[in-house]
Amino acid sequence: MIVNRFDYQTVPDGGSFGVGFDLLETSSFSCNEVNLALSMLELRRRYFGDGVVAIDCGANIGVHTIEWARAMTGWGEVIAIEAQERVFYALAGNIALNNCFNARAMLAAVGDKSGSIRVPVLDHTRPASFGSLELDRKDTTEFVGQPVDYSEHATQELSCLTLDSLRLKRVDLIKIDIEGMEKEALTGADSILRQCKPIVVAEFIKSDKGALKSLLECFDYKVFELRMDLVAIHREDRALNHVHQ
């Protein structure tokens, strides 16, 4: 894996966190979430056949993307979307390094409408938890380890897309970890949720958990809370039986 050694933030108690930090210190990141997704992808293959499609929104450097693509060699593909240009380069590099010919990377933000968005540009030669960057500034915006400048001169314009705009005929799993824009991403996936009924794993720590849950339930999803994520499975999906078991 291509990893930025400055991808960490130190907290007051002396500890550190970050995708790069965890990979360099423990050779792993988000193991439970990765394993959950892999088991869900296997279930989708069992019940819907080969041709599984997974979307990794907020792919970072590709921990989920690489694991999914390797596991689905010969029977599935991954679309990995990342909004930070320098992080995106590592994502694309990791896809190439691991020979994941069933994965493709897209440099874009995901939202509720297609267009453009201005993205803050961090200094990747200084420590920060790059994956914690929020594209939209809020009163509760997290400090990532270095100041974030949202002014026009310190940001760059980036394409913003809706998942529906990808015009996919099949979607089995959507993972959304985009630092507070999870609801917008789901709103922009209206057609996918209605027609494909994919399993959804959405982080809620920077979003309104209740609003996310209500939105998914409107599409007839059964929603479970697992650590920092909401896991939603459509009530018609036979994978739901395995969750109950």
Image (cartoon, rainbow, N blue to C red):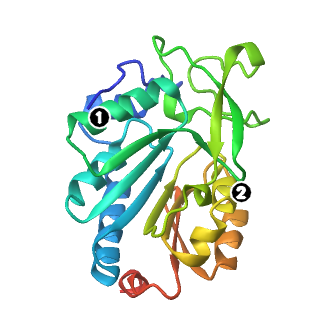
Q: Residue at x 32, y 69 (%)?
A: 51
Using the image, determine if residue 90 lies above or below residue 177. Answer: above
Using the image, determine if residue 80 lies above or below residue 54. Answer: above
Using the image, determine if residue 22 lies above or below residue 193. Answer: above
The numbered disc on residue 208 is 2
Residue that numbered label 1 is attached to = 94
Residue 32: x and y in percent read: 34, 57
Crowding near the residue tagged with mark 2, few <14, some 14–19, many ≥20 C-alpha atoms within 10 Å: few
Viewed as shown, does residue 89 lie left or right of 221? left
**Residue sitting nearer the eye, 219 or 144:** 219
Residue 1: x and y in percent read: 26, 32
- Going by the numbered disc 2, the residue's amino acid type is Asp
Residue 129: x and y in percent read: 50, 28
Q: Residue at x 32, y 26 (%)?
A: 3
- Going by the numbered disc 1, the residue's amino acid type is Asn
For mark 2, give the secondary structure: loop
Q: Quadrant of residue 155?
A: top right
For mark 1, give the secondary structure: helix
Viewed as shown, does residue 173 lie left or right of 122? left
Residue 202: x and y in percent read: 55, 58
Q: Residue at x 43, y 69 (%)?
A: 172
